Image (cartoon, grey):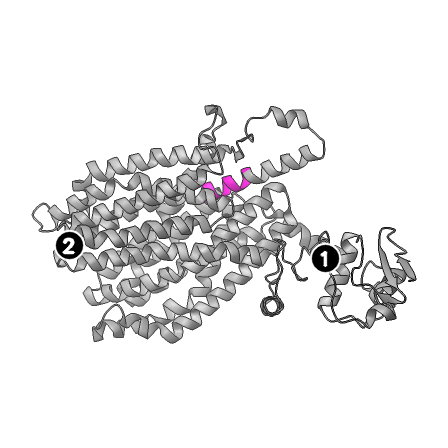
Amino acid sequence: MKVTQLKCPCHNGLTTNLCEGKPVKKMVRSFAPRCSVQHHNLMQRGMRRVNATNISKHSHLDVGHAKLFFSPDISRRKRIFPVVNDQPRSDYGVGPYDAEERFVPKKEYLLRRFKEDIFESMGIDGLRSGSVSREVVTLALPAIVGQAIEPLAQLMETAYIGRLGPVELASAGVCVSIFNIISKLFNVPLLGITTSFVAEDIAKRASRESVSDKGFQAENIESESLFNEIEGREQLPSVSTALLLATGIGIFEALVLYLAAGLLLNMMGISSASPMRSPSQQFLSLRALGAPAVVVSLAVQGVFRGFKDTKTPLLCVGVGNLSAVFLLPILMYSFRLGVTGAAIATVASQYIITFMLIWFLSKRVVLLPPKMEDLKFGDYIKSGGFLLGRTLSVLITMTLGTSMAARQGPLAMAAHQICLQVWLAVSLLSDALAVSGQALIASSFSEGDYKKVKEIAYCVLKIGLFAGVFLAIILCTCFGSIAELFTKDVEVLRIVRSGLLFVSATQPINALAFVFDGLHYGVSDFSYSARSMMLVGAISSAFLLYAPSIFGLAGIWSGLTIFMSLRMVAGFLRMASKTGPWWFLQQDFQKTEIRS
């Protein structure tokens, strides 16, 4: 039997055995990586009949190599490309294997390509493996679900407490408001800072390992203790600092809520003679015991976001809140603890979430540092001070709007509360996009990869704008039905429907405002975020003080629209600045103009 061997003219290792002019079933080949990927991709796209000359023009293959694959003997075979075990897979998800080396069936492959074409038609780079939009969506989707679980659990708690009577429901409502205000004031800044600092630490560690792999500065890296690995776990100063700060802040919040419960209730208008005073004080004192767990859990969630992992927090938050739903009826009705049982169930669920998060985190990082001087208390306190002022400005503006609505009467206040809750609830999608953009940008920015930072920023802004428009359309068509879920009062519903324009039309503005905040957090531009928010809050608060007396609820909604619009404008102006952290965007534009 005559065996002919064809050799690749550009790669000596590539051979194809032909037996009497026909290809044998087993083709022994040693492919160069790019050769196999290029040819495999061409076969997947149905381009087998293209001649060798055209193939060589559109790839790195020369004519001789292309003829080898498109010879008459091989072209008569079925459209099957044999894959050997050591053949490299495509890194871009366009072959039958994805980035995780898993085989992709034909139907799934075609569905992925269809999704990619849809995103490309929107101006987004598609959902290919390794693409920026894929990373953003992968991080954002679990974050959206995770942020939606807690409000749903709170609604379940409210429903159970509501069965006890109006006094208990009102008492719990006041206490939850106090708890949320104090928690947001301190917890939100810590969450944002932790995400950025952890992502930066991870990126720096990866760059140092890359330098070590190349043989440079090996001795220096080995001597550094900041990025050691202990039993396969990473040691990051930002993680240890966040945990210690969260523990301290949580204990401080617990002491304030427990010891000053009476004073806080007096400030909220619940006097000692009120029938709500006793259940309110008892409920708030018990909820105070869960403050350390809430702060630590949020800090750990920020750590996982820095690791670009939003699935683990989703699992822990889901299990914890399910436990609360299970414990609420047992403690409230079976044990007849009433409001006290509701508080115990909520605190227990908060500690379940915290312990699960810490357990998962301990598998990845060393929780405590070997040296106290390795901690970054100075960086956290400095950036946290800026964000504390920023959060305070947001709370003052939103509280002022609610206060001015209350002066319009009970019907107007009820309508405003419905519009405000729907307005904020649908913004969870935009906030999740901001979180994913922050984590991705913090990592790339610390590595100095400005090209990828630019790509991520534009991608997140495009997705945010599209999401805002989509939400506006959905709310415009369904807002009337959604409002009826909250009340059946005809007069309240009439006022609520007058706020349709405020709730729906402002969604694109809200989306871009949240996304800009996340982008600035990603480049650690906390000082500008704080100063701009203080200015925006002052302007909006001044408008809210005078407009409602003239325009009623329309003036309040206009003031909140101005608030979000100015936030969006402030974010855009910072990115367009030539002197801020986004200077490289302007530099790229200038280069483009010079070349043209």
Say few, some or many: other residues with alpha carbon within 10 Å of mark 2 (under 14 / 14 to 19 / 20 or more).
some
Q: Nearer the viewer, residue 382 or 155?
A: 155
Residue shown at 51% from the left, 44% from the top: 307
Q: Mark 1 is on which residue type? A: Glu
Q: Residue 50's spot in the image, x, y percent?
A: 82, 71
| Residue 567 in view (yes/no) | no
Q: Residue 194's spot in the image, x, y percent?
A: 46, 41
Q: According to the image, label 2 marks what residue?
A: 333
Q: Is residue 195 magenta?
A: yes
| Main secondary-structure element of the magenta-colored stretch | helix
Q: Mark 2 is on which residue type? A: Tyr
- Label 2 or label 1, whichever lies nearer to me, is 2
Residue at the left extreme, as displayed? 273
Instruction: Kindly identify which numbered label has been placed on residue 73.
Output: none
Q: What stretch is highlighted in magenta?
A: 192-201
Q: To which quarter of the image does residue 382 belong? A: top left
Residue shown at 21% from the left, 67% from the top: 411
Q: In this view, does 535 lie to the left or right of 137?
A: left
SS label for mark 2: helix
Q: In this view, does 185 lie to the left or right of 515?
A: left
| Residue 75 in view (yes/no) | yes
Q: According to the image, label 1 marks what residue?
A: 593
